Each structure stands twice: as structure tokens, then as C-alpha cells.
Amino acid sequence: MRHKTFVFLATIAASVIAIGACSGPPGRHVAPAQSGSGRLIVILIDNSGSTVGERRTGLYTKIVTELATGLEPGDRIVAGVINDHSHLFEPIVHETLPHVSENSSFFSISYWSGSGPMAEEVKRKHEAAELEAEKAQIAQALAAAAGSKDKAPNTCICAAIEVVATQYLLTWSGQKFVVILSDGIEDCQGLVLGPGIPTQRLTLGLRSRLPDLHGVIAYFAGLSTSSPSRFRTNQQIWQSVLADSGADVCQQHMGYDPPLRELRSCK
């Protein structure tokens, strides 16, 4: 397990999500997602040994809690873990949040039609309560993964991205976000993102594993290394390979403690 002696924290001012795919061995895949016009939010949580510190101190939990708070009616949420078996990705969360009826104007026909205004208000309150209950369940599942004590020996970030891209992102026509809670140290299938390896070689290795990510908004929350200089190098590497693959990613996406209640592009 890689031991990190320094964690560089960067506060980012926007929030969350999505990316595409990398090569990885075939595994068990859930049924592909149907296309939708709402927001698809994919969350990948690194459970490898090098992120135990972040999970133990509650930093990952804080991020996913903020994210769950900002979920909206109609959002589709898919979440899973990054580990040494990422190609066997199975969602820990796979939900579509219910819609809540809009308030009708007092002077509109719809306000007085149907069951009447009082009944409609009762219905809206019931729908809002269901929405909050679902968000609470999602927050609980995300927090359990974010606070897990698992220590996977390897970090197969690309394999996890490959599965969620194939099964979810590539078939979705609405907004697509992904947030990756990881230190960013890919250590899988012979590629190790660490010191001692030329930056160009690392960049080319990761780039070769990423597909076309146009239309995807990517955040890398939790990026950290053993030194400030290495942090900047890894930040530049991931920012470069994601941008070159077409993802919408900018420097303020690459940090530790983003306010995830508001999801938007960096453009």
C-alpha cells in the first residue's frame, strides 16, 4: 500500500461529474441504461489501500453527503467503487429520483381542475417527502462506501470508467456528469501513476485507455499525492488526458473539497 505523507488540498468552486471509458477485461455488467433527457450522475469511490486515510477522516463522506444534498427530482444516480476488480463493476446505487409536481397558478385552469387545489397540494407534499426519503437512502449508501475500511491492493480507475461509460454514459442523451473520489494513482494492468516514470509515458498510457468523452462533465475530487510537486504533475496529467478525450474538465474540478450541490460545466 502506498503511504502518503502529504495531501494537497484544493478547494473547488463548482460541482460534479462525469466521464467515459478505458480498456479493461470483460466482467459482469448490469443492463445498459436507457437514454434520458435529465441528468445522469455517476459517482466512483476509490476503495484502494492508498485512500484509507481520506476515508477514515471522513473527507470522502463529506463530499458524497454534499453531493446527495444537491440531487434534484428526475436525476439518475449510479455509484460504485474503484478497486482491483473494477471491471466487475456492480452499482451500490442505481436510482432515478421521483419527480415532484409543480405548483399551478391560482388563475390557471389546472389549479381548479382534477381533484382540486387542496388535494393537489397534499399530493405535492407527499411527492416531496418521497423525494427526500430517497435522497436520504442514497446518501446513506454513498456514505457507507465513502467510509469503508476496505484496502484493495490496486487502483483500477480506468476499468471502472470503461464499465460506466459503456453501460450508462454512452447511451444517455441528457447531461452527463461523473465525479471520481480518488487520489488519482492508477495502479492497474501494468500502468502505475507514480514517481520515477516519465510524465509523457504516463500521459500516453492513460490517454490510450480513454474513449471519446465529448458531452461528459468530469470532476476528480480527492486528487492527492505524497508531495506538492507530484500533486501538480498528476493534476496536469489527468486534466490533459480527460480534456484530450473530449471531457469538460478544468483545474477547479481537480481538488479535494468541492461544493457539490450545484452541478455545472466549467465552460
Image (spheres, rainbow, N blue to C red):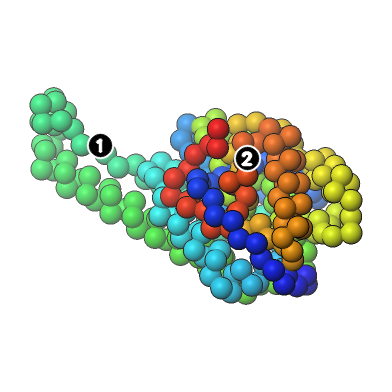
Query: What SS does tag 1 mark?
Result: loop
Determine whether 41 is above or below 225 in the image: above
Q: First in sequence: mark 1 or mark 2?
A: 1
* Front-lying residue, 26 or 164: 164
Q: Residue at x 70, y 43 (%)?
A: 239
Measured as percent of width and height from the top left, residue 192 is found at: 84, 57
Amino acid at pointer 1: Glu
Query: Neighbour class for label 2 at 10 Å: few (<14), some, many (≥20)?
Result: many
Looking at the rendered structure, the number of numbered marks drawn on it comes to 2
* Front-lying residue, 14 or 136: 14
* Front-lying residue, 147 or 80: 147
Measured as percent of width and height from the top left, residue 260 is found at: 48, 51
- Spatial CA span between label 1 and label 2: 33 Å
Measured as percent of width and height from the top left, residue 87 is found at: 73, 53
Q: Which residue bears the numbered disc 2?
A: 249
In the displayed structure image, the side of residue 237 where residue 251 appears, left or right: left
Amino acid at pointer 2: Val
In the displayed structure image, the side of residue 128 where residue 108 appears, left or right: left
Q: Residue at x 89, y 51 (%)?
A: 198
Residue 78 visible to an observer of this rendering = no
Query: Neighbour class for label 1 at 10 Å: few (<14), some, many (≥20)?
Result: few
Report the disc number at residue 52. none
Query: What SS does tag 2 mark?
Result: loop
Q: Which residue bears the numbered disc 1?
A: 102
Quarter assignment of residue 168: top right
Quarter occupied by the C terminus: top right
* Front-lying residue, 132 or 51: 51
Q: Nearer the viewer, mark 1 or mark 2?
A: 2
Quarter occupied by the N terminus: bottom right
Q: Residue at x 88, y 46 (%)?
A: 201
